[in-house]
Image (spheres, helix red, strand yellow):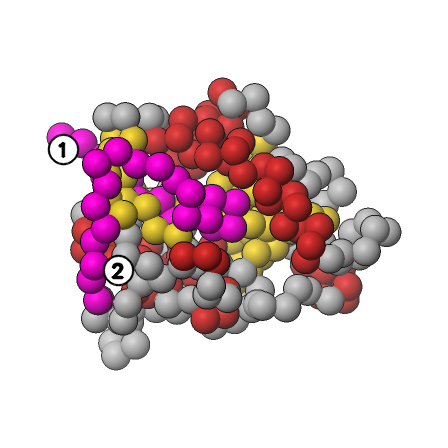
Amino acid sequence: MAPAVVGIIGGSALGDAFELEDEQAKFLVTPHGAPSDPPRMGKRGAVTVIFLPRHGKDHRIPPHKLNHRANLWAMKEIGATHILATSSTGSLKKTIHPGTFVVPDDFIGYWDIPTYYDDRVVHATPSLDGAVRAALVAAAKEAQATVHDGGTYVQTTGPRLETRAEVAHFKKIGDVVGMTMASEATLASELGIPYASLCTVDNFCNGIVDEPLTFEKIRETQRQNADLTRTVVGKALERIR
């Protein structure tokens, strides 16, 4: 069996700070346009890795402007056999605290989920890959991080955060809220690439606790957890075969 080539889509917690050995930028334009940045291919220990910062260099692309179809296609074209992502989320449950991790096993995407099948009828069943999920959960535990194994991710449309009324609804059906993972997971399923995400919990959603929600507070939590997120991702790479 050929060794795995692991694609990493780095969210806000990773940014574009994920070091690889012998890395080379891969400049390409897909049939769906250009990815957020030229993916970087290199080694992390014995593992071949393709790293793509979801929001581009310096976090310049807002979530509602991301070209998910180009990002996932680029991963496939360069040779990714598996994809793991990091995703910034807000917690819908008082028992899921900021500074912890969730590795969802399901998701809900109501709006604007992209597809590669614009011109023919194909009904793909999206999913999150069990083996990649298991690697992320085990890596988080090895890093002594608090991780929730399973949960439902609810995708909303950014860039604005959710209203208190929306959060009151979402907390009945989900565990965390984000703006990107459902789109990526759906496209990865269409491409036949195993995909899962390490969700960093960066805040309680609007109205879950009494403390006011500000973007500055979210960014502060992301910065505090960046090193731990990188550690977990690095340990997960060693477990993907």
Residue 70 seen anywhere in this rendered image of the structure: yes
Q: Is residue 239 above or below residue 196?
A: above
| N-terminal-most mark, 2 or 1 | 1
Residue flagged by tag 1: what amino acid is it? Ala
Q: Is residue 77 left or right of residue 44?
A: left
Element at badge 2?
Answer: helix
Residue 72 location, quadrant: bottom left
The residue identified by callout 2 is 73
Q: Quadrant of the N terminus?
A: top left
Q: For the point 37% across and 67% down, which residue is it?
A: 67
The residue identified by callout 1 is 2
Question: Is residue 28 or residue 132 the one in the foreground?
Answer: 28
Q: Is residue 184 left or right of residue 30?
A: right
Label annotation for residue 186: none
Residue 5: say if magenta.
Answer: yes
For the record, the magenta segment spans 1-30
Q: Residues within 10 Å of mark 1 (few under 14, many from 20)?
A: few
Q: For the point 62% across and 38% down, which residue is it?
A: 224
Question: Is residue 183 or residue 158 the one in the foreground?
Answer: 158
Residue flagged by tag 2: what amino acid is it? Trp
Residue 130 seen anywhere in this rendered image of the structure: no
Residue 118 location, quadrant: bottom left
Determine the residue located farthest toward the left in the rendered image: 1
Q: Is residue 27 above or below residue 237?
A: below
Q: For the point 81% across and 56% down, which residue is it?
A: 212
Determine the residue located farthest toward the right in the rendered image: 210
Percent of width and height locating residue 80? 24, 46
Residue 93: say if magenta.
Answer: no
Q: Quadrant of the C terminus?
A: top left
Gap in Å between the C-alphas at discs 2 and 1? 21 Å
Percent of width and height locating residue 59? 48, 58
Question: Is residue 198 or residue 216 the one in the foreground?
Answer: 216
